[in-house]
Image (cartoon, grey):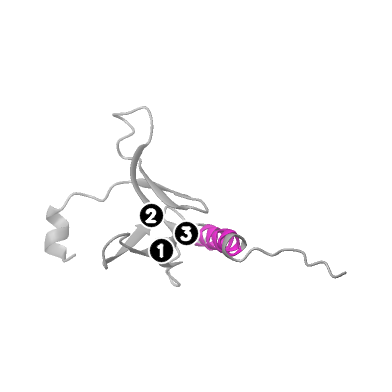
Amino acid sequence: LSRRSAKTSPPPPIVSVEISQYGIRMLDKSKLGHETDDHFTHFFALKNISFCGFHPRNERYFGFITKHPKSYRFACHVFLGEKSTRTVSDALGNAFKRFYQEYMAFTHPTEDIYME
């Protein structure tokens, strides 16, 4: 965004990010005054996330890159946290590990081999 367009565009929404072994779910917190529950905005499946991390000089910035599930398009999502986003990045790394372990267990099951 240029400075000129940033002055005229609405402020970004306040969101909460939930991470699981299935993906990233974003909840719109700016609409809490109008609704009793969090407003679900987006879900990004873990298999479509290609990169994530926090900024090395300012850990309040966190971002991830996603692939569109059907077309060959990519998007970069960047967030500014209230404090360090290192724990968010670590949580997503752990989710990737769990996802990979489940994937390997399903696609390459190990069976005990008995020799007689």
Give the magenta range: 89-104
**Quadrant in the picture for the C terminus:** bottom right
Q: Which residue is mark 1?
A: 49
Front label number (2 vs 3): 2
- Dividing the picture into quadrants, the one containing residue 80 is bottom left
Secondary-structure class at tag 1: strand
Q: Which disc, if any, is residue 85?
A: 3
Q: Residues within 10 Å of mark 1 (few under 14, many from 20)?
A: some
| Depth order, front residue of 103/28 | 103
Which is more N-terminal, label 1 or label 2?
2
Secondary-structure class at tag 2: strand
Q: Which disc, if any, is residue 44?
A: 2
* Residue 79: image location, x then y, percent: 36, 58
Farthest residue to the front: give it.
116
The answer to whether residue 61 is seen in the rendering is no
Which is more N-terminal, label 3 or label 2?
2
- The vertical placement of 79 against 57, above or below, is above
> Residue visible at 26% across and 64% down?
71
The answer to whether residue 81 is seen in the rendering is yes
Q: Answer left or right for 6 relative to 27.
A: left
The number of callouts visible is 3
> Which residue type carries mark 1?
Ile
> Which residue type carries mark 2?
Phe
> Which residue type carries mark 3?
Thr
**Quadrant in the picture for the N terminus:** bottom left
Which is more N-terminal, label 1 or label 3?
1
The answer to the question of whether label 2 and label 1 lie on touching residues, with beta carbons closer than 8 A, is yes
> Residue visible at 12% across and 54% down?
8
* Residue 67: image location, x then y, percent: 33, 64
